Amino acid sequence: MDATKMAAVGLSASYGRGPAITDINLEFGPNSATAIIGPSGCGKSTFIRCLNRMHETAPRATVTGKVFLDGEDIYEQDPTAVRRRIGMVFQRPNPFATMTIFDNVAAALRFNGRHSREETDKIVYESLQAAALWEEVKDHLFAGATSLSGGQQQRLCIARALAAQPEVLLMDEPCSALDPISTAKVEDLIFTLKRTYTVIIVTHNMQQAARVADRTAFFYLGKLIEVNDTKEIFERPKEKLTEGYVSGRFG
Amino acid sequence: MPIVAERKAFSAGLDELNENMATLAELAKLSIRKAVATLETRPEAIASDGRDVFALDQEIYALKQQVVKGCVDLIALHAPVAKDLRLITTSLEISTDLDRIGRYSRDIVEISNLLGEEARSPTAANVDLVRLGNLAIDIVDRALTAFAARDAEAVADIVRRDDPIDDLHDKVFREIIERMTDHSISPRAGAEFVLINRYFERLADHAVNIGLHVTYMVTGVRPRVKAEGAKGPFGDPS
Ligand SMILES: Nc1ncnc2c1ncn2[C@@H]1O[C@H](COP(=O)(O)OP(=O)(O)O)[C@@H](O)[C@H]1O
Ligand SMILES: [Mg+2]
């Protein structure tokens, strides 16, 4: 990896009791996708929620260590400003149910200062284009968001995240509630997005990690066991634990 | 402790692959032995050994097809990774080497059959072909032992043993030309000897290939033994 866009340094977190993740050191390059894999409960979600300061909103949550974005520790910055630069897409599509498709995307702009009507139209259009949803919704932008299929709703959530013009996109199992065709569309989208953004994707689907990620990090029991180019992780993992997990022998 | 998954269907598929590969290796070893024997004990033994080699070649081909199908099924159904994936891709490659070994053995027997009409065996004609054949048997045996034992280190020794084989091949080639020139063998016999000579050298190249595949299978790293463009294992023996 040549340059670093984001880096976790000595990052640990808990929900008040024992640690959920311990001493994670992990770097993310610009214009690349990194997959976080590992069995349920190993701390994948906790880890990426620390990367945009979401974790600390949970009751009794603690975080220690540093997270650098462009060389500056996000834990010394305003959390709202941090979350604007680091967008997040969740496992279940969570569009605002009472809003139209258009307003779901435009909603992201309200947190981003004032925009003229033309600017808003332009950003909504560009975000829906970038999320590969524009062609499917351009004729009913003012229909309710819940009229969309699950896969379309997830792309709508991606469009909403992109409208805030983030630099980093965190995705927590973004395809686990989607059918194979929708999954393929979202994966294609990730493939395109990583040219522009730093993408960090949690997935329990090994093949998905293999398909979309340049680098893959394997977590186990709250620790980072191994990180490497995705091809290395799947062809010749160094650690026995990684080998066992990626070959489906435990997890 | 990790929660262990059994993956019974996958394990059964890998077991079957390993058994088929072991059988394929035994058949290939046998066919090259019998092929070399037809050069020594002519013409009486040629008939029976020769028939065996033809049958072995067919068996090897059929089993190789089965291995290929089994590997494709494993890849399609189980999306293997890491050392499972390396075992499967390596088995595919080695099965091709073994198929070629069976095929060369058959080619050698075909020539022995033709030479049955000639008065002189290569040994009688003072051509060192049988020694080369025995070296080929030896290097193939070593490669297949390395495969069975998953021995990543054996490749260095196998590659080292390929050099004297190349040298002997060149020496035998000169001998054949000499015998043809002084008319102690017919041009026809000489031409057939040249082919067998080349087949033995190629058999040894397949043994080197197998050794290299084994190293990759075990370590995940493809060894680089000879420089690019050099004659030998990195060529495309066929
Ligand atoms: N809100 C929570 N409160 C308490 N413990 C939690 C909470 N969320 C997760 N945990 C615990 O933290 C650990 C890591 O969980 P998580 O980060 O969700 O794992 P993953 O995303 O890899 O499945 C687990 O032991 C889990 O039980
Ligand atoms: Mg999770």
Image (cartoon, helix red, strand yellow):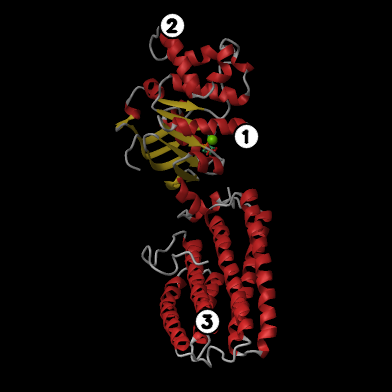
How far apart are the two marked residues, 1 and 3, measured between alpha carbons? 60 Å
- The foreground one among A150 and B133 is B133
Label 3 sits on residue: B193
Residue, x 49% and y 88% (percent of image)?
Answer: B127
Amino acid beneath label 1: Pro
- In this rendering, would A107 be left or right of B60? left
Specify the label residue A117 is tagged with.
2
Give the Cα separation between the discs numbered 3 and 2: 88 Å
Residue shown at 53% from the left, 88% from the top: B122
Instruction: Read off the residue under disc 1.
Output: A180
Query: Where B97 sits versus A127, above or below?
Result: below
B72 displayed left or right of B168: right
Foreground: A155 or B179?
Answer: B179
Q: Callout 2: residue from which chain? A: A
Local secondary structure at mark 1: helix
Left or right: B131 in relation to B17 = left
> In the figure, A205 relative to B152: above or below?
above
Q: Earlier in the sequence, mark 2 or mark 1?
A: 2
Q: Residue A21 placed where, x, y %?
A: 45, 40
